[in-house]
Amino acid sequence: MDLYFDSGDDATAYPVILDSGSSNLAMAIESCTNCGEASTDLAPTLTSPEMCIEVTYGSGAWFGYEVESSYVAVDSDVSAYTTYAGITYQDDFFEGGDSYVGILGMAYQGIANSYYSDTCDESSSSSRGRGASSERGRGGGRSDAEERGRSPRRLNEATSSISSTTDAAVPFLYALEEAGAISEAAFAVAMCGDEAKVSIGGLDASMYTGDVSYAATQETMGEYYGYFLIYTTAVTVGTTSVTVEDVNEYGGLVVDTGTTLHYLPTATVKAIETAVTAAVDDATITSKSFYEWESCVSADDLSLFPDVTYTFSESSDDDASTFDVTLSPYHYMLDYDDCYYWGFEESTLGIFGNIGMKDRVVIFDVTNNQIGMATGVCTDDDTATFYKSPAQMMGEVVAQARSKSYSQLAVGLVSAVAVVGTVLASAFVVLNKVTTKAAASPSLDSEETKTLLPPM
């Protein structure tokens, strides 16, 4: 999606990754030494004294500095003055050319990496706290399942030994809620083919049909709210139940817009593969090559594959109500270069990836500590502009060039912005600003804001 940043007399739009699996807002700035095509003209003022930050994801990492509080906006009504990280060095993070120049982490503050002072050395950042490499939804490519599946570790250990002071980063979603720009710290994402739609501040009713199934967000490792974790009681392939013994080891599955594939413990993935092989003709899946990404299947072959059903629980209580989310082969395989690749990988930390979100709406609610899922309202033609919202009553907004600047995003601009992106043609709908704030976001003490796991 596009975010607007104050740059002199104008607020300029820059494309960022919307990531429910991390919590830091970070942008490539003018002084970035190796950002390549992702370099920007942003030249923000750094805090004094300088505060450093480094974040390692499942794939890629970056190093940067905290900038002074500045204007950041979705549109003129939905904006806040907030700090963010100015990226000055990156390692395999900007892999999409100029299709994105930053990242907007939308998870809980509990997994926000902190700023630190004392020693700021970007040259060592790529080796300090470097995470495992994996595919993260930026096209095809084989993920390193063995490295991706290793036990997560405390990232801040790398910096705590050299830090004299630390400063917890405030996620942008929290800043918007605190400023009164949105009614609650919540957002929803709908994905339809190559189209996507986001509502910030709550759930836009036009995005879904039928009922919404909600589940309580589980505390990460039973200690603090960090990831959007959903408790999982069963996984079924066709009519065959597979083991889910370790699926909830960290509290549940991470529901993550920033990860493409589905990640599950090794025993569960192997059981799924066995059940799928038994259901599909051997001529379609050649030995183990399909599960190793050495071969793929055509769209016509998808009808041979069984559905995979996740059973989610409203809470971790034994007597809690459950609901099913059934994935067709289209929702658990990766469509890449006119072929469909296997969509499950092994990991100690389970992830419900964004291929499973196709044709669905997912609600991420920090204020009420819940995750919701519903059937998305999608057009028949997934190449058409996916843009249905209450804002249409005020007139639809013609997509604007991403590089265009708007003079301070003049007040009165309709509260919806349609953006044609490089990868996704997206429509962003912002629920109306309210004058009375909703309940405050969950407060987090210093212990709860420590990062126990890497951002997705």
Image: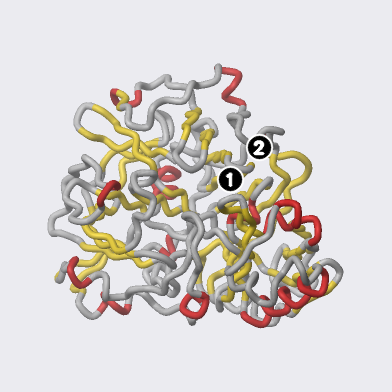
Point out the residue furthest to the front here. Answer: 283
Q: Is residue 259 left or right of residue 60?
A: right
Instruction: Say which quadrant the N terminus sits in.
Output: top left
**In the rendered structure, are the residues bearing label 1 and label 2 in contact, judged by CB atoms less than 8 Å apart?**
yes
Q: Is residue 49 above or below residue 439?
A: below
Q: Nearer the viewer, residue 319 or 248?
A: 248
What colour scheme does the image use? secondary structure
Q: Position of residue 245 (x, y in %)?
A: 69, 82
| Residue at image location 44% in from the left, 48% down from the top | 173
| Residue at image location 54% in from the left, 76% down from the top | 221
User: Which quarter of the picture shows residue 326?
Assistant: bottom right
User: Which quarter of the picture shows residue 313?
Assistant: bottom right
- Residue type indicated by callout 2: Met
Residue marked by disc 2:
207
| Residue at image location 37% in from the left, 55% down from the top | 95
Q: Nearer the viewer, residue 230 or 370?
A: 230
- Residue type indicated by callout 1: Ala
Q: Is residue 104 left or right of residue 232?
A: left
Q: Position of residue 395 (x, y in %)?
A: 55, 17
Using the numbered discs, state the Cα–Cα distance from disc 1 to disc 2 in whole angstroms.
Answer: 9 Å
Residue marked by disc 1:
188
